[in-house]
Amino acid sequence: MGHYLRELIQKHKAGIRLGIFSVCSANEFVLESLLEFGRKHDQAVLIEATSNQVNQYGGYTGMVPRDFVEFVAGIAAKAGFPKDKVILGGDHLGPNPWRQEPAAEAMAKAEVLVQEYVRAGFSKIHLDASMHLSDDGDRRVALDPKLIAQRTAQLCQAAEAAYQELLKENPGAVPPVYVIGTEVPAPGGTQGDDEGLSVTKSEDFHATVNLTREAFAQKGLDEAWARVIAVVVQPGVEFGDHSIHEYNREQARELTSQLAQYPGLVLEGHSTDYQQPQALKEMVEDGVAILKVGPELTFALREALFLLEHIEQQTPALAGRALSGLQETMEEVMLAEPANWAPYYKGSEAEVRFARKYSLSDRIRYYWPHPKAEAAVERLLANLGSVDIPLTLLSQYLPRQYVKVREGRLPKEAEALIKDRIAEVYEKYLYAITPV
């Protein structure tokens, strides 16, 4: 049985300009909305976890790879989505979580990481060894591309060994497909709005492909190289706290035109969040056939929750009840545990306070699993679930959802309203990946 993504890319290279979007999130609202959207539109879905989110030590979600697989399977069952149409990917798999450690130790952990992903059933593996490790010398000097390629091949060799083990348990397991390369800036996006942004140079793209292919060949990984489907590049899209770098196909043309030389490869674009629908479609047409999105989805979740809190506060039937205090709770939690936002948000006290709520980087997303945040959300949903949400407030705060409720296309229930707000993001990606 062939891999869905290999077949998709074969069609794309044959001139049918379709693509796929990749949802990089561990948020239950985001994933449930995705799977319901996929069921409605009869689409396969691609869900990815990063090496910081999910790893052999639990990552910041507390999940190892097998836990994440079970987590997604549970949501798919709830959403009535067929398990065989879920594609799981690992994003930036490599030594990034251990970059402060010596290369030998960091790479040993990275090999275990990749193997655990493959054994758990992740079949799209982004191998990323682009970061300096503690004994790699001056971090201000770019890491040697040959060394990056050698480490990438080392990780692939570990992944292939894990796949052979997986076959013993599951003879029908499809072999993993691989993505190589990394975007500029490094994983995590920009830390400010004034940083320069450069489209990946064509010579750097060719060097990544050629050096990695050579490194694979040196390790006898020619068959695995045939399953390398994409290269992560910077096509000129990124976002800061309050600004968005829009895709410009003319500026990217020198890069995207190089794909004609590689019949089996497309480009993978990260940080495509907040791009306009037409820009996303142009990216797919230009060969950026895999579009990664994450923070925009939890940004939409945050919008929906905050808007529902406004409705909660102003609903007459809830007067005198204990309200959720959601926004106040989130500020309290973020101030008490600043590690996930303090290194990233800059400016005056007022500007940083604003960013904690409204930054496009959406670092508030790290705090939704906090027990106090979960309790506040549960209280909000319970309060709104106990009353008839006034149509006037729905029109005021969620006008697009109001129209759908009036037309009978959407239940007037808090959870349905939240998931529909998130699904508005999926709508533009569906438009982008669907050929005319």
Image: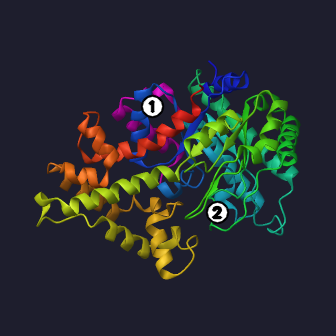
At 49% across and 81% down in the image, what residue appears?
349
* Mark 2 crowd level (few <14, some 14–19, many ≥20, 10 Å Cα): many
Check residue 84 for magenta coloring: yes
Q: Is residue 393 visible?
A: yes
- The reply to whether residue 46 is in sight is no
- Looking at this view, is 70 or 376 the one in front? 376
| C-alpha gap between disc 1 and disc 2 | 30 Å
Return the residue at label 1: 38
* Tag 1 secondary structure: helix
Q: Nearer the viewer, residue 206 or 17?
A: 17
- Sooner in the amino-acid sequence: mark 1 or mark 2: 1
Seen in the picture, residue 102 relative to 149 is either above or below; the reply is below
Local crowd size for mark 1, using a 10 Å CA cut-off: few (<14), some (14–19), many (≥20): many
Residue found at x 27% / y 50%: 395
As for residue 421 lying within the magenta part, the answer is: no
The residue at 37%/67% (across/down) is: 330
Please tell me which residue lies in front, 244 or 54: 244
- Please report the residue visible at 73 percent of the width from the left and 25 percent of the height from the top: 13
For the C terminus, which image quadrant? top right
The amino acid marked with disc number 1 is: Gly
Residue 385 rendering spot, x and y as whole percentages: 19, 49
Residue most toward the bottom?
A: 348
Q: Which secondary structure type mostly characterizes the magenta part of the structure?
A: helix
Q: Which residue is mark 2?
A: 190
Q: Which residues are magenta?
A: 62-87
Colour pattern: rainbow
Q: Position of residue 422 (x, y in %)?
A: 41, 46
Which residue in the rendered view is the most extreme toward the top?
A: 1
Give x and y (percent) for residue 39.
Answer: 41, 28
Q: Tag 2, which secondary structure?
A: loop
